[in-house]
Image (cartoon, helix red, strand yellow):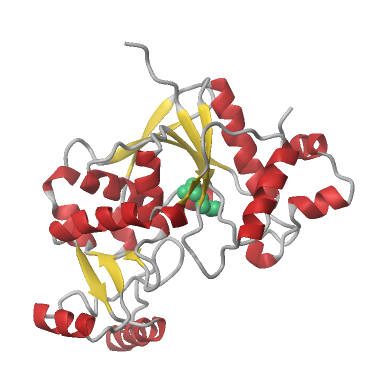
Amino acid sequence: MAKSPPVFRFAPSPNGRLHLGHALSALTSAQLCTRFDGQLLLRIEDIDLTRCRPEFEQGIDEDLAWLGVRFDGAVRRQSEHFDDYRSALARLQEMALVYPCFCSRQDVKLAVARREAETGKPWPRDPDGAPLYPGSCRDLSEKERDERMAAGEPHVLRLAMDRALASANLSCPAFAYSVFDASGDEQRIAVDPARWGDVVLARKDVPTSYHLSVVVDDAIQGVSHIVRGRDLEAATDIHVVLQRLLGLPTPLYHFHRLLADETGQKLAKSRQSPGLADLRAQGVTPAEIRRQLGFT
Ligand code: GLU
């Protein structure tokens, strides 16, 4: 049987315009996709219904077309697929690996400060620098959970990481994933998801989270090769756990460098990094952007 072509994707969030960091990511995906004779899909990651806007999605389309990045197949918009994420959550709930957490950000902050005061030691942080969830809601009684949910108390759903990792299918075969490079060489990377603690799988306002929807969508879209920035390298451990729990394939990964501004900080929408549209308005050409980013 003929081997199916590799499937790549570019997955921006329409909560602002694209900047040079996105251009690097899109161009790297396109370049590797061409090299491996694959297909490149576009996915719009718009689960954040308050921050994502249709005009940003339109801007993303314009920026990518201007840059010369072309996509195959239909665009997948996450906001149109909440049922897919609900069924994945339901499976994890059946495995008793998910629990409701009623803590506000402030509750978590106070609980962490209390633990730090009690132990005199800094509370562990996750790879992004946020304090690990101290587990306040992990052991609530069934009765209390049901009552608070029935009363409509806002809550997120968290993955019980210890229980997830203890479940048999996470120990065999060796718990790892593979990264690939431009020459097609692969290297195994061991995962250490415990450093993230009980991550949120469904937010208060939507029945999913970045981690859950990205894993579900990659499987539904048949994505075999994921190209993403190094800032998402540690989070990939969470994705591999979810893939194992849900019985989904683990794609190959490639992490590209991150671009920094003059102050050495990573380019980000939140820091008002100049957008591709701004550069275009200043007369910069796509060819100049490609050259600047190291593409010939
Ligand atoms: N939507 C994510 C972002 O814009 C990236 C998607 C991914 O590689 O998982 O950073």
Q: Which of 215 and 149 is in front in this view?
A: 149
Quadrant assignment for the C terminus: top right
Taking the image as shown, residue 110 lies to the left or right of residue 264, namely left
Q: Which of 144 and 152 is in front in this view?
A: 152
Is residue 259 in view from this perspective? Answer: no
State the image coordinates of residue 294 (x, y, percent, origin top left): 72, 34
The quarter holding residue 293 reads: top right
Residue 94 lies, with reference to residue 218, above or below; the image says below
Residue 134 lies, with reference to residue 200, above or below; the image says below
Taking the image as shown, residue 198 lies to the left or right of residue 24, namely left
Outermost residue on the top side: it is 1
State the image coordinates of residue 235 (x, y, percent, origin top left): 41, 53
Is residue 206 in view from this perspective? Answer: yes
State the image coordinates of residue 126 (x, y, percent, origin top left): 39, 64
Residue 170 lies, with reference to residue 98, above or below; the image says above
Outermost residue on the right side: it is 283
Q: Which residue is drawn at 45% across and 67% down?
A: 129
Quadrant assignment for the N terminus: top left
State the image coordinates of residue 83 (x, y, percent, origin top left): 32, 55
The quarter holding residue 42 reads: top right
Q: Residue at x 72, y 57 (%)?
A: 261
